[in-house]
């Protein structure tokens, strides 16, 4: 038992944990930075929005390992190739949700807003984004959990992360390291899910929460 | 105050115009109702006033100036806008919804708060109760009232209303119509009002513009004149076969020539404020020729009214309109 | 944490993809890997469905069971795949091979499948069930003739998500001896032979995307409005 807990005291444990978190956070941030502008640029046109959403859907089907593996011949081993692959994985859920969320805002509400004299920019900032926010944040949450889980695989292309510990444990037949690494990733994934779930609720406008509750009645 | 000059609208890829050479004028302080069957271009015409749609030909003048003089966004902030599905912002409170245009115009906070409360009172909603609620918590009728309040918020001289009472059941619709007429009596806005319901048009309008399919103006006149003298087969069938009865609903017992009372105790009682149509209905229903007219305010009999008088009035009115 | 520099582009051409290798090894490596992968995925989806359908039907009747079921399957879902494989491998009696892979794949897809079975059954209008009851159908007949058929589009949507996920994660299973297209990827990486990696990755991607599109088409076929048009 003692050797199990010793795992968490190892130097490389802390290192890999930090690398794992770093990879995940950066990949997610860049993913948002790429997906959101695309969604904002395309949601108004039915054609381009459909292109964006369909591309996102296909992107979601691609296996995580396949993307990491494909990056390897082009960019080699290491942190950067892993980051590129994880960023590509992060984009689809955000793109799909942002596009759908923005284009599904009630058109009557938007007509009323235009008729009252709000400019397009004001409508986007004051009406469309707040109303679409819950859906957008749900997409970011899905993406975050996926990225944290997939970052485990970065070990196969030399990116580091907690996957290193699992591979180490398997190779050396060391159950303590294996279990320690596995549990940590699982906990990390759960924490990510809960944190972003909380974030999603925080960014849902109160009026929409009220409406949701009423519909549930 | 609002003038349509040879306004037409044809959409790209279509050969038929949706609005065809529309010309008429809405006077200040009047409610002008655009009414007609679906496809007559009434909503399109209304939306050209605040440039949500731009005309293909012609121009619309507001107070003598073309409405293209300023940007569409600025124009719309000076025009109240209320639509059938209301379109309240679900993520904002009732107070924030109403305050939208005043906030755009950068009124100061105290003025906005006072105005919101004033408007809620005006539409019959208790400010303390409704100010901080969200749209999802309100019934359809309440939401519609908030929609009207929101359109009135910045005290615009002009209002555009597209079936604003349409999403409610008939009983509440009548109530909302009556209340709106009461409000208009106090504030006297210039209003373009769209509906498909001829009865609503007759009730609400100072002037009615009847549009035909293809966006052509069939007749533009006061409700009385249209009922008395429809200018075409289309208008008279649109108005309805009960045209004369509709005309009688515009006159009241107090408008009629009463005969002197002479002790007719068991005749049916007719109130002064009653419409002639309701009075006629009452008399026919009781099977008698004549009723006793009583005053609303004091006790006492004003005289008697006969079915004959009503009949004479309706044909005189019709002849009179046609003669003009 | 910087790795080796980017591979020079001139080197990429011939080094990157060796068609010769592909044609040489098509039958003894590539096709078996593909077959193994399809088999693994198919078996996992089938077992998962076998568990999820009755569970989902049960949970839709006894809603109190729904939160704990969601909790457990959600927990299983949140364990990242490699970790799950590793943990299962270390359980005595399982070890390396296809067993830990299938177990993990089934465990992952339970959440989505059960949730969609319940949602599908929930989507059946009360009036329809009422009419069936009124016509004298037994609860069992209502389930099989009314509820499940109408719930099918949503259930198939769940099968689609589960299948795509399973195909994807099965690639990782090769690392613990599960075989399949992941084998090509891993051996390719360890021997620094890009062709292998690309073949494995591209085939896995194609398999997943094709399954996605196929099941999407099936889903669309089953949608009520499509049914109404045919009727």
Image (tube, rainbow, N blue to C red):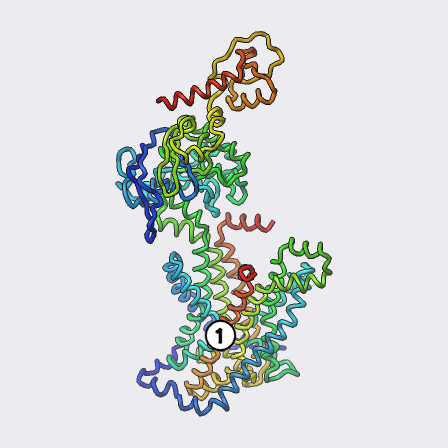
Q: Percent x, y for residue B282?
A: 57, 22
The residue located at (44%, 89%) in the rendering is C191
Q: Nearer the viewer, residue A89 or A17?
A: A89
Q: Nearer the viewer, residue C119 or C126?
A: C126
In the visual, does C127 lie left or right of A20?
A: right
In the displayed structure, A56 sits above or below C135; it is: below
Within 10 Å of disc 1 (Cα), the crowding (few <14, some 14-19, many 20+) is some
On what subunit does the disc labeled 1 rest? C
In the displayed structure, B52 sits above or below C162; it is: above
The residue located at (33%, 29%) in the rendering is B27
Residue placed under numbered mark 1 in the picture: C210
When asked about the image quadrant of residue C16, the answer is bottom left
In the displayed structure, B234 sits above or below A17; it is: above
Q: Nearer the viewer, residue B323 or B196?
A: B323
In the visual, does A45 lie left or right of A131?
A: left
Furthest residue in direction top, as rendered: B262
Where does the C terminus of chain B fall, quadrant-wise? Answer: top left
When asked about the image quadrant of residue A19, the answer is bottom left
Furthest residue in direction bottom, as rendered: C24
Where does the N terminus of chain B fall, quadrant-wise? Answer: top left
Q: Percent x, y for residue B131?
A: 49, 38
In the visual, does A101 lie left or right of B284?
A: left
In the visual, does A210 lie left or right of A159?
A: right
Residue B152 can be seen, yes or no: no
Q: Percent x, y for residue C231?
A: 57, 60
Q: Nearer the viewer, residue C87 or B248?
A: B248
Q: Report helix, strand or loop for mark 1.
A: helix
Q: Percent x, y for residue C54?
A: 67, 68
- What is the number of callouts on the image? 1
Residue C108 can be seen, yes or no: yes
């Amino acid at each position: 038992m003692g050797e199990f807990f010793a795992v968490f005291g190892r130097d490389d444990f802390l290192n890999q944990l930090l690398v794992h978190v770093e990879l995940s956070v950066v990949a997610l941030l860049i993913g948002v930075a790429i997906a959101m502008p695309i969604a904002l640029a395309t949601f108004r046109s039915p054609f381009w929005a459909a292109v964006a959403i369909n591309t996102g859907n296909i992107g979601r089907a691609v296996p995580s390992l396949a993307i990491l593996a494909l990056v390897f011949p082009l960019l080699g081993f290491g942190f950067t190739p892993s980051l590129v692959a994880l960023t590509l994985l992060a984009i689809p859920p955000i793109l799909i949700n942002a596009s759908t969320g923005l284009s599904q805002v009630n058109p009557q509400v938007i007509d009323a807003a235009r008729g009252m004299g709000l400019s397009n920019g004001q409508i986007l900032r004051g009406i469309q984004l707040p109303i679409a926010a819950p859906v957008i944040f749900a997409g970011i949450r899905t993406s975050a959990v996926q990225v944290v889980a997939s970052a485990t695989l970065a070990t196969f292309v030399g990116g580091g992360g907690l996957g290193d510990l699992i591979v180490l444990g398997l190779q050396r037949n060391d159950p303590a390291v294996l279990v320690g690494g596995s549990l940590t990733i699982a906990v990390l994934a759960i924490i990510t899910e809960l944190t972003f779930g909380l974030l999603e609720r925080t960014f849902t406008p109160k009026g929409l929460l009220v409406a949701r509750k009423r519909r549930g009645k | 105050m609002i003038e349509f000059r040879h306004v037409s609208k044809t959409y790209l890829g279509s050969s038929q115009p949706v609005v065809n050479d529309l010309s008429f004028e809405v006077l200040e302080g009047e409610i002008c109702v655009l009414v007609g069957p679906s496809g007559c271009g009434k909503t399109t015409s209304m939306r050209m006033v605040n440039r949500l749609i731009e005309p293909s030909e012609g121009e619309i003048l507001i107070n003598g100036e073309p409405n293209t003089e300023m940007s569409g966004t600025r124009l719309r902030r000076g025009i109240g806008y209320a639509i059938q599905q209301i379109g309240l912002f679900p993520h904002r409170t009732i107070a924030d919804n109403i305050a939208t245009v005043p906030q755009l115009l950068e009124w100061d906070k105290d003025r906005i708060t006072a105005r919101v409360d004033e408007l809620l009172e005006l539409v019959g909603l208790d400010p303390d109760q409704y100010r901080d609620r969200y749209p999802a918590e309100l019934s359809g009728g309440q939401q519609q009232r908030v929609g009207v309040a929101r359109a009135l918020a910045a005290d615009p001289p002009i209002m555009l209303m597209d079936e604003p009472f349409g999403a409610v059941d008939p009983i509440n619709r009548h109530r909302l119509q009556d209340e709106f007429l009461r409000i208009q009596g106090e504030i006297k806005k210039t209003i373009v009002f769209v509906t498909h319901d001829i009865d609503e048009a007759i009730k609400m309008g100072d002037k009615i513009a009847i549009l035909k399919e293809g966006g052509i103006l069939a007749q533009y006149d006061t409700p009385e004149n249209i009922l008395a003298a429809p200018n075409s087969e289309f208008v008279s069938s649109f108005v309805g076969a009960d045209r004369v009865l509709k005309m009688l609903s515009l006159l009241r017992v107090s408008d009629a020539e009463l005969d002197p009372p002479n002790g007719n105790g068991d005749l049916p009682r007719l109130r002064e404020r009653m419409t002639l149509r309701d009075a006629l209905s009452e008399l026919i229903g009781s099977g008698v020729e004549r009723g006793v007219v009583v005053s609303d305010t004091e006790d006492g009999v004003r005289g008697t009214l006969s079915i004959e008088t009503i009949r004479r009035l309706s044909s005189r009115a019709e002849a009179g309109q046609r003669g003009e | 944490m910087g790795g080796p520099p980017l591979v020079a582009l001139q080197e990429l051409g011939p080094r990157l993809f060796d068609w010769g290798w592909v044609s040489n090894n098509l039958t003894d490596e590539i096709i078996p890997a593909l077959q193994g992968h399809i088999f693994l995925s198919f078996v996992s989806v089938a077992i998962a469905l076998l568990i999820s359908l009755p569970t989902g039907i049960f949970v839709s009747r006894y809603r109190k069971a729904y939160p704990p079921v969601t909790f457990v399957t959600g927990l299983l879902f949140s364990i990242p795949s490699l970790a799950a494989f590793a943990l299962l491998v270390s359980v005595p009696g399982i070890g390396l091979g296809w067993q830990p892979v299938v177990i993990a794949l089934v465990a992952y897809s339970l959440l989505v499948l059960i949730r969609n079975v319940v949602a599908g059954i929930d989507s059946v209008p009360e009036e329809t069930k009422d009419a069936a009851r009124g016509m004298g159908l037994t609860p069992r007949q209502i389930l099989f003739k009314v509820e499940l058929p109408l719930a099918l589009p949503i259930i198939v949507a769940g099968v689609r998500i589960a299948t795509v996920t399973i195909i994807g994660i099965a690639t990782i299973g090769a690392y613990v001896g599960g075989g399949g297209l992941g084998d090509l990827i891993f051996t390719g990486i360890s021997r620094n032979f890009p062709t292998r990696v690309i073949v494995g990755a591209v085939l896995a991607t194609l398999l997943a995307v094709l399954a996605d599109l196929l099941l999407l088409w099936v889903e669309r076929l089953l949608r009520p409005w499509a049914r109404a048009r045919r009727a």
